[in-house]
Amino acid sequence: MSTSIAPSPAAVPTVISTKAGTGKVTLAHVVNAEWIKFRTLRSTYYTLLAVVVADIGIGIASCYGAVDRIQHPRHEGPGRFLQDFSPAEWSLQGYNLAQLALGVLGVLIVTGEYSTGMIRASLSAVPRRLPMLWAKAAVFGVVAAVLSCVCVLTSFFVGQSILSTVHVQTTISAPGVSRVVFGTALYLTVVGLLSVALGTMIRNAAGGIATLLGVLFIVPLLVEGLPTTWHDHIAPYLPSAAGSAVMTLKQDPTLLSPGTGLLVLAVYLVVAYLGAAVVLKRRDA
Amino acid sequence: MIEAVGLTKRYGPKTAVQDLSFSVRPGIVTGFLGPNGAGKSTTMRMLLGLDTPSSGHAVVNGRRYAEHAAPLREVGAMLEARAIHTGRSAYNHLLALAATHAIPRARVEEVIDLVGLREVARRRAGGFSLGMGQRLGIASALLGDPATVILDEPVNGLDPEGILWIRNLLKSLASEGRTVLVSSHLMSEMALTAEHLIVIGRGKLIADTSVADFTRSASQGGVLVRTPDSVRLGELLGALPEVTVRSDDSDVQLLTVEGAPSERIGRLAAEHGLVLFELTPQQASLEEAFMELTKDSVEYEAVVTPSELVKEPAA
């Protein structure tokens, strides 16, 4: 194989080039490089597709489920089911699985570089290292935000039109609804960004994904088991609960207010990226 | 120009590189030689700031690598053949690296042609053979048209044609005035390519010498002479100052002469009308000289002889 592609060894290659340009490493250049890396892997598209399918698919399916339960009540009366029914949140339930797919992609865009050795090429090109982290976060953050908005809005509008067949739909202009819709998209983006930082700190796909699962799903269960006084002080501040505060329509006494929830998510982001920056800068690649 | 000053790297209790100082000049190919595990790759990684030295520092073209505004234009490196995401095509890999320095697409195309990867450039790098991976690594190294080129074991996995290509490439890079540092564990390869040698073993500097001096110090085998007049020639040579002659008990025609070059022995024989059947300068092979030099510093030495293995296969 390599024989057939080899240039003639007799010809001494001329290497001096006039085509290499004179550009320097700038954050804008590194963002462009990370965008090229992001869009030139097939796995990116598969995972993004998984996010879309999970979010919109589950949203639509659960709306049909709600219609069915309202039309054909079994043990419970239709009134019972409708008592706590919030059509906006109901149509957005897909975020639960979508956050996982988006988180996996966030972990992978960093750990994939470590597992393949690509990181050594990346850090040779950007030896100051931190611009690479900021560029990865910027590229992934924008993609995650745009995709989340598309998914969440689609889930919402398709879901409401399904729910309208039994007249329980709501509208985006109803009080608090747009906050819930865009809050869900925001939460998805934050989970994605947190997983980029997690991947940078842990460097290993399995470890990064396991930690992500732990933080989002296992830790809340463990906290449930704590004594009530502890639990009440810890539980609302977990990332998933802070997210719920932003994504919940009715004020829930066990949750923070939407504003405080947003603030807590921001603190998580800052802490995670500080940790990621220190690890990336300090540890040998 | 590369300058390493007291480079040391410790991993826990193990010292991979110890107080290593050397400089690599532009315009020639410098071979970086040592047995496996001697610390060659670790040293190269420290030159590029991928590993932080435990002490000491390295400077490339007057600055630490990370302090350059456009590092790929200063130093092009191929550290391991596979510093490539397996899911990305060679073209996109180079395009992403080029983007960090706003290196135009035209240069990406140029290096692809230079290393002969045109036909496979759009394929996923995961399916590349070892040799194709090496070529892609070299393309990445040359992307920024750098003044200094660092290549870790570039001939690994290449076929004879590819090895010849690398030799020519390295020489032409050096002839353009670039600094070229190439690591290898094969002395014979370096003898053909390099002008200067930096030899390390167990992380320490063993030799910093020109290939010519190294070869000279290695060729102490004298001259082998076969002649039917061995006694007469032996007397004539033995009479010369600083020449020693050894005869061979098992072959009366054979002499080993030290201290006189083969030309002089041939002329002497001709002056006296003596017949020569054979006149062979003996050179200890470079490989032998290298092994002699590094034998105390080989990291993983086979301590069990093959016969012992046969007797005790469980061991």
Image (cartoon, helix red, strand yellow):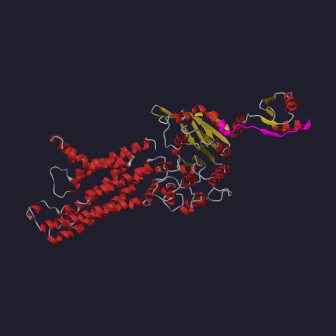
- Note whether B115 is above or below B200 in the view shown: below
| Magenta stretch in the rendered image | B270-289
In percent of width and height, residue A150 lies at 31, 64
**Residue occupying image coordinates x 77% and y 34%:** B222
Quadrant of residue B255 within the rendered picture:
top right
Question: Position of B67 compared to A277: left or right?
Answer: right
> What is the count of numbered marks?
0
**Nearest to the observer: residue B70 or residue B224:** B224
Given residues B66 and A224, the one toward you in this image is A224
- The quadrant of the rendering that contains the N terminus of chain B is top right
Q: Identify the residue shown where x is 59% and y is 31%.
A: B296
- Whether residue B98 is in magenta: the answer is no
Residue A74 in picture, x, y percent from top left: 10, 64
Residue sitting at the far bottom = A165
Q: Position of residue A121 (x, y in %)?
A: 50, 50
Q: Quadrant of residue A227?
A: top left
Q: Residue furthest front?
A: B311
Q: Looking at the image, can residue B136 be seen?
A: yes
Q: Is residue B202 visible?
A: no
Query: Is A158 or A42 nearer to us in this picture?
Result: A42
B179 to the left or right of B251: left
The reply to whether the magenta stretch includes residue B281 is yes
Q: Position of residue B280 (x, y in %)?
A: 78, 39
* Image height of B18 relative to A177, above or below: above
For this rendering, which residue is in front, B93 or B48? B93
Identify the residue at horizontal 57%, vertical 57% (top origin).
Answer: A21
Q: Eyeballing the image, is B41 above or below B118?
A: above
